[in-house]
Image (tube, grey):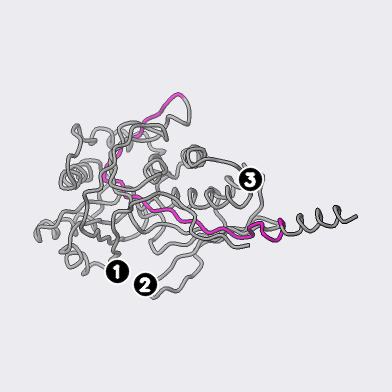
């Protein structure tokens, strides 16, 4: 009788200690230039190119729930959050794939669909939290493989998941999660961003004509420094057919101020490097300050 009582108490304690909420975060990613690569499988389909893993990204709060619900929030400059979307086909697909039901709230200070890799960041942050919350037993590599497959199949991105697996500014020489990625961390100055709104990523990734033009603009050399990254990205922006009038105007003024800058891929915005970049961008709207991230997705809080 006593053994049964002790066993019951242990089970109750385990239930009480089992996490009810897990909060995870993942940095965003700005691509300076890219080229789609279609492999034999979805795992080796993706993109090659170069970009920067940025300190601002997505925080995902995941709770055990009877029914799945997804809320996408944006945080303003004052720190207040507001809902921008109820539901996410990408995240809903991921939760259904693993047969779990949860309440998910994703939050970012950056605008959606503007070239910051937020769909990949939201997916990686959510799956990192879900894996811990439901004890799915996935490694970080497993999570990355699943996130990459979901994003490619939904046409929301090609290489951001691979890039966001870790920090630094990245040179991706092979597509997919297992593709060769060189990461450099010699980027001490801040990065500043201005956005004029989204570009419809699925429409571009699904256009053979546009993808052919992007492929022809892809650089033939590899950047050796952060200056090289911006120069190659700028050449790509000018020759890929993706540059908008707003972006072109800002880039010309950055040139006049001696500021390294290029277009966010894929987004209607500009990212610029160094202390003088803020003053060059500030006449065009709210400016977001970021730094190079030193890490990928990670859990930041577990609540029982």
Q: Which residue is under mark 3?
A: 96
Magenta-tinted stretch = 14-40
Q: Could you say which is closer to the camera, residue 284 or residue 102?
A: 102
> Whole-percent x and y of residue 6?
81, 56
Q: Residue at x 86, y 53 (%)?
A: 4
Residue 203, image x, y percentages: 41, 44
Element at label 1? loop
Kind of element beneath mark 3: helix
Which residue is painted at 28% across and 58% down in the image?
291
The residue that disc 1 covers is: 286
Q: Point out the tag, 1 or 2, that comes first from the N-terminus.
A: 2
Q: CA distance from mark 1 to mark 2?
A: 9 Å
Residue 93's place in the image compared with 288, above or below, is above
Q: Specify the label residue 242 is tagged with.
A: none
Q: Residues within 10 Å of mark 2 (few under 14, many from 20)?
A: few
Q: In x, y percent, where is residue 45? A: 42, 31
- Going 68% across and 58% down the picture, which residue do you hit? 65
């Amino acid at each position: 009788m006593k053994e049964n009582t002790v066993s019951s108490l242990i089970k109750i304690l385990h239930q009480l200690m089992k996490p009810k909420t897990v909060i995870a975060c993942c940095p965003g990613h700005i691509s300076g230039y890219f080229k789609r690569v279609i492999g034999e499988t979805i795992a080796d389909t993706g993109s090659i190119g170069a970009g920067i893993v940025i300190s601002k990204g997505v925080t995902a709060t995941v709770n055990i729930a009877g029914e799945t619900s997804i809320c996408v929030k944006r945080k303003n400059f004052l720190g207040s959050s507001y809902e921008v979307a109820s539901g996410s086909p990408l995240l809903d697909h991921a939760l259904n794939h693993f047969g779990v039901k949860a309440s998910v709230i994703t939050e970012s200070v950056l605008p959606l669909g503007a070239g910051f890799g937020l769909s990949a960041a939201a997916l990686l942050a959510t799956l990192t939290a879900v894996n811990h919350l439901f004890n799915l037993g996935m490694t970080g590599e497993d999570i990355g493989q699943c996130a990459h497959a979901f994003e490619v199949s939904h046409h929301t991105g090609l290489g951001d998941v691979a890039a966001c697996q870790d920090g630094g500014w990245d040179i991706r020489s092979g597509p997919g999660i297992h593709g060769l990625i060189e990461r450099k961390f010699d980027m001490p100055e801040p990065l500043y961003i201005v956005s004029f709104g989204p570009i419809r990523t699925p429409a571009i990734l699904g256009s053979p004509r546009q993808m052919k033009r992007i492929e022809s603009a892809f650089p033939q050399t590899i950047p050796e420094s952060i200056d090289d990254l911006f120069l190659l990205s700028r050449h790509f922006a000018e020759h890929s057919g993706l540059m908008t009038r707003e972006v072109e105007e800002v880039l010309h003024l950055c040139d006049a101020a001696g500021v390294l800058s290029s277009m966010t891929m894929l987004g209607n915005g500009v990212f610029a490097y160094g202390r003088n970049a803020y003053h060059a961008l500030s006449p065009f709207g709210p400016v977001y300050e970021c730094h190079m991230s030193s890490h990928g997705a990670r859990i930041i809080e577990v609540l029982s």
